[in-house]
Amino acid sequence: MIESLEWALLVVAGLVLSSVLLSPLAIRLGAPILLIFLGIGMLVGQDGPGGYAFDDFDLAYQVGSIALAVILFAGGLGTRVRDIRVCWGPALTLATLGVLITAAVVGVSVWLLGVSLLVALLLGAVVGSTDAAATFLLLQGRGIKLKGRVMETIVVESGLNDPMAIFLTIVLVAFVDAGAAELSWEVGGTFALQLGMGALAGLLGGLILAWLINRLELASGLFAVLALSGAMALFGGTQLIGGSGYLAVYLCGVVLMDRMSGLRREELDITHGSLAWLSQILMFLMLGLLVTPHQFTGGIMHAAGVAFILIFIARPLAVAISLAPFKFSLEERLFIAWVGLRGAVPIFLAIIPVMSPGPVDVNFFNVVFMVVIASLLLQGWTIPWLARRLDLEVEPHASAP
């Protein structure tokens, strides 16, 4: 147990510093950087050389909520309105119908393997969404540029689909805890209300913040503070009134970046990019700490089966159905199906049923963690190769002499 603030600061700062210093190694090996962050957390954890026992799921959930809000806000700042205009149809369909199909296919498949239907559907909901943090890091962080509107579709989908996965998870946790098996029309109404209030709050919040930033004369550096504090207030307020705070902060970032003047836009872009990196590092380190690998033995085959269904059946089927009305080539559909990266969000969502008083225990969390690792290893490692193989990557222009 860390007994003083000084030791806590030394440990946390040391872990973040180690993560940053080791990130070039991941790039050199072609591995997803997120694996480095998770690995360091596991090394410091109970089964690693660090031996630090951390099992506070409540604290992890609270910290993870804030970190995810910061990541989505930064993701919104990095998403241009012109990108949304060219892909809003397929991205929105993937973010809603695609998540539902993925969750249903995984859930029914796991149910056929002998797990209770509600718990199986809950597992499908937890792993059902493409992770924004993993997608932003892998595609944008490594400078991968794709032809057509593939990049825009993937990035916007990953930013919009978290509310659907979060809503499905919370609803199914309630049903699992209550032992109920019937859904009511009220559930659909609640979901529509959450999305509607979240979208409205995000658009209004972005317009108000942009108006303030464009008209106030503040010291250099305070514009980023104003934007972040406004976004976090928007997140908390939207959650309190029953809307989706995650959708609100993402849309707030999109509108804010579109409406700001040039110099202030550059300041926010740099500052919030750094904050997003810090949030992702802290989030993955903490999630790595939560894991106890010696408990994996009994669930490895189960997790491998879930990962196989998710990657090779559920995600491709969801993409095929969701993108059927839109004009994408076969190569583009294959690539979008493969870039269904799972990252911090499924692990974060797996905390919710573990915290609840229902029958789901820590083994559920461990299975989700192993599924995420499988996704990062198999999909994350091969995305650049697949983009070149399918001839979807834009070749960089040769620099002028």
Image (cartoon, grey):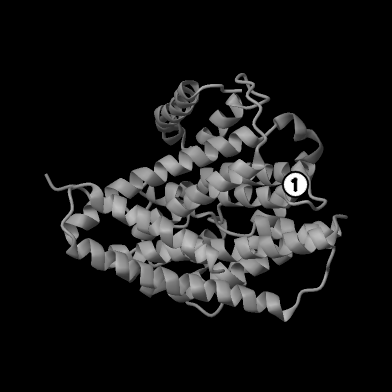
Q: Position of residue 65 (x, y in %)?
A: 54, 51
Q: Is residue 359 above or below residue 1?
A: below
Q: Is residue 190 left or right of residue 122?
A: left
Q: Is residue 237 left or right of residue 101?
A: left
Q: Tell which of 214 and 255 is nearer to you.
A: 214
- Residue reaching furthest to the right: 114
Residue beneath disc 1:
364
Residue 363 falls in image quadrant: top right
**Quadrant where the image shows the N terminus:** top right
Give the residue displayed 78% in from the left and 45% down from the top.
Answer: 361
Task: Count neighbours of disc 1 (C-alpha within 10 A) and say few if under 14, some if 14 to 19, many if 20 or more.
Answer: some
Percent x, y of residue 343: 56, 48
The residue at the point 51 percent across, 35 percent down is 37
Mark 1, secondary structure of its residue: helix
Figure disc tally: 1
Task: Name the foreground residue: 357 vs 367.
Answer: 357
Q: Is residue 323 left or right of residue 365?
A: left
Q: Is residue 134 visible?
A: no
Question: Residue 314: where, in percent of width, then height?
Answer: 67, 62
Which of the image's four quarters has the C terminus? Answer: top left
Q: Amino acid at mark 1?
A: Phe
Does residue 204 sit above or below 209 in this rendering? below
Residue found at x 50% / y 74% = 197
Residue under the point 64% across and 36% down: 290
Position in image of residue 5 (x %, y %):
48, 25
25 to the left or right of 371: left
For the question of whether residue 239 can be seen, the reply is yes
Q: Nearer the viewer, residue 157 or 400?
A: 157
The residue furthest top is 49
